[in-house]
Amino acid sequence: MGDDENRPQKAIPAAVKAMVVDTLGGRVQVSWDPASAATPFGQLVFFAEFLEVSGLFDAWVEECPLIYNSPNAPKKRDVLGTWNLSILAGHRRYAHVTALRSDGVSPQILGMSKIVSEDALRRALGKIPEAEGTEWMRKHLFKSVAAACHTPWILDIDTTIKTLFGHQEGAEVGYNPHKPGRPSHAYHAYWMGNLRLLLDVEVTAGNTTASNHAQPGLNRVLDALSAEQRPYLVRGDCGFGNDAVIREMETRQQAYLFKLRQSPRVKRLLQRAFTRRDWMNAGQGWEGREDSIQLAGWQQSRRVVILRRLLKQNLIATQEQQGQLEFAFVDRRQTKVYEYAVLVTDLTESILGIAQLYRDRADAENGFDELKNQWGWGGYSTRDLARCRLSARAVGLIYNWWSWYTRLAFPESRREAITSRPLLLSAIGRSTKHAGQTQLYLTPMHAEQKKVERGIENIRRGLRAVRQTAERLLGHQPWDLLVRYIVAQITQSPWLPDGAIPALAGP
């Protein structure tokens, strides 16, 4: 109190005048205060504690192969910290970094000296050698998920398209369902199914959407896993249901589940199967039966599961005769119309189990949607393909970190960024310094403040437990312990290794 009385008052410059604004609620006096340290991401302080306990951010910065020769160049931590903040904020362009330049709180929270400009960030990423940068990002992507690979999990592979409108390297015309004929990039992604964690992503030219372009990345992911970390199942759509991919899985003795294309032999198999009466319940309105098939080019026959489901919507059949389009309403009492799928697998599970395993693959599409529309995956475009690849992996890495963080806060459910950012990141933060200490005042902006407080309490309780346990168990890495703790909270099971029970302090 006495210090506040003795502190000299900051004079308002004569050139700065309050603006009188007539609003719907009356007259308001407005003036700018650019000198105060404030941030719209006040709750970043708790995420910074998560990164500090886990050691993820420090290791990512330390191992970055970015080297400057100029003494006036920005620090490596400032560059990567700015990139991290931009991705967390949901930006899609380097130009969006400008919106962070006046943030006076976030740099200190992340141990940075400043937020660099968009041009400095873009040029810095261009100085990272492509081969070294690729290995750096792959290492940390794998590190962010490796501790979760010791429990049974499913590896999903899929490809998504990023439409391009400029003159980027690799912008080729290929399969583009959203904008046919437009150049694009192909993103071959490798997921931990249901957990929605990204193992790796390959960015290639738009005319390389076929599975033979995704298979090298799949092999590399499997090679990086030890025997204990191998997935229970590799799963993919009809693009991967071909002999080359299947033979590779069989050579590796890796279980697989793929969908087959509607080739002539598959259609003949369906014709024979539809006359049979031994269809079994496959769940959610589907019927199924198993068979075997050897397609052209296959060296052996393989087990397939045929699924069908009766369409119940109002249907119209159309045909063109002599230039005239004719249509007729389909009477469901007399005509049955089915949709079907043919799955090839080496699993021994029942038809119902296999059908449900493939239906669960739809969750991978939710991950694609979240990364593309809520995280700016495919953004940060540059003319060279190397920085596009680097950015795609960086977005995936920050996405993985944030996914673990939100599950630590709310272990009972998974929340996408569109809901988790307002809950766990957004808050007006105002920083003051006195006697060498920093005080951060948070003003909540979310209506469900009790839920926010409960999530922060869960986060701090978990970080406190992991920090104290890591000090007692010197042979265990904090990040591995933290993942064990989060998984234990999700499954409501014990998490401490080797039965060690440290004495946890209070809040």
Image (cartoon, rainbow, N blue to C red):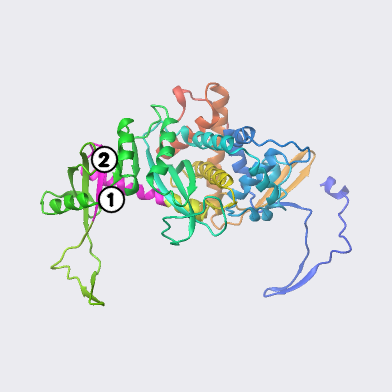
- Give the SS element for disc 2: strand
Residue at image position (28%, 50%) is 261
| Any part of residue 504 in sight | no
Q: Is residue 358 magenta?
A: yes
Q: Is residue 31 above or below residue 401?
A: below
Which is more toward the observer, 308 or 85? Answer: 308
Q: Quadrant of residue 230?
A: top left
Mark before the other along the chain sequence, 2 or 1 = 1
Three-letter amino acid code at disc 2?
Thr
Q: Is residue 172 magenta?
A: no
Distance from the alpha carbon under mark 2 to that under mark 1:
14 Å
Task: Name the side, left or right, on which 101 lies relative to 64.
Answer: right
Task: Name the side, left or right, on which 482 lies relative to 103.
Answer: left
Residue at image position (75%, 39%) is 437
Residue 370 position in % (x across, y down): 48, 52
Q: Which residues are magenta?
A: 340-365
Residue at image position (23%, 38%) is 349
Task: Return the residue at label 1.
Answer: 261
Residue 476 position in % (x across, y down): 52, 24
Q: Is residue 213 above or below residue 19?
A: above
- The C terminus sits in image quarter: top right
Task: Return the residue at label 2.
Answer: 345
- Give the SS element for disc 1: loop
